[in-house]
Image: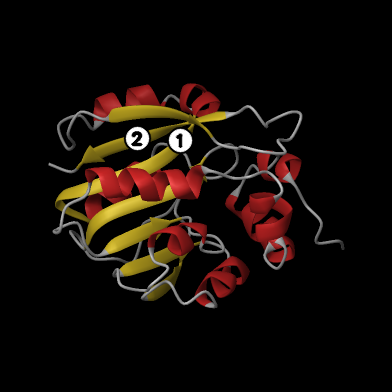
Amino acid sequence: MSSKKGLKDAYSLKTPKDNINLYKIWASSYDDDFAKKNDFRSPSLISNYFSQYSHSMDFPILDVGAGTGLIGEEMNANNKLELDAIDISPEMLQAAKLKNCYSKIIEADLTKKLNIENDSYGAIVSAGTFTHGHIGPNALDELIRIAKPNGLFVITIHSKFFVKSNFKQKFNEIKNQITNPIYHEEHAYGNNPDKDHGQDTVFIVVFRKK
């Protein structure tokens, strides 16, 4: 089976098993076939907004849906931050591990309860994970649980998926657990965009756990 995949494949996912199967095939070429080809901007946007909103207590950091480590490359080129990676795909995590930008690699299904202690992380970052066929708003419950009080969240949510999966209702449900979210709408892709999804936008959502 060819490893040549693209945006259409990513947007067609429906279940965690679909994710495992696709990224098993795609892991070795994902950075070239997806990130570089489509000028995937979300990891650098997350890194920039994290720098804008973070302070010295926002550690350790968990990269949720880390994939091949694109956020890790942006945030931790010099390996100075305590940054962990979590993803459902062992093949993608192996690619991330080879970049030497993570302190710990965690294989887990983000739609289920995580084997991580309460109040473990000072910050949660994520790019391209809250989107079609990946994880929905209910995953926020576990992420809030494992974040420290006052822990910083800087995550992308695909703008159409935000509406389709009713993230607005979810944020209303958890409003007593978090600060008021700040939304920055940005284009997910830059140069050489896909004709169907190249103009897609994401919300960079920033908030803290109370």
The quarter of the picture where residue 13 lies is top right
Residue 17 rendering spot, x and y as whole percentages: 63, 55
Mark 2, residue position: 205
Which amino acid does the dot numbered 2 rest on? Val
**In the image, is 179 to the left or to the right of 72?**
left
Residue 127 visible: no
Quarter holding the C terminus is top left
Which amino acid does the dot numbered 1 rest on? Ile
Q: Which mark is residue 157?
A: 1
Q: Which mark is residue 37?
A: none
Residue found 67% across the figure and 45% down from its top: 10
Whole-angstrom CA distance, mark 1 to mark 2, is 7 Å
**In the image, is 22 to the left or to the right of 65?**
right
Residue found 24% across the figure and 65% down from its top: 60
The residue sitting at the right extreme is 1
Q: Nearer the viewer, residue 31 or 160?
A: 31
Residue 32 rendering spot, x and y as whole percentages: 71, 58
Compared with 3, 199 (above or below) is above
The quarter of the picture where residue 199 lies is top right
Q: Would you call the spot at circle 2 few (<14 residues within 10 Å), some (14-19), or many (20 or more)?
A: some
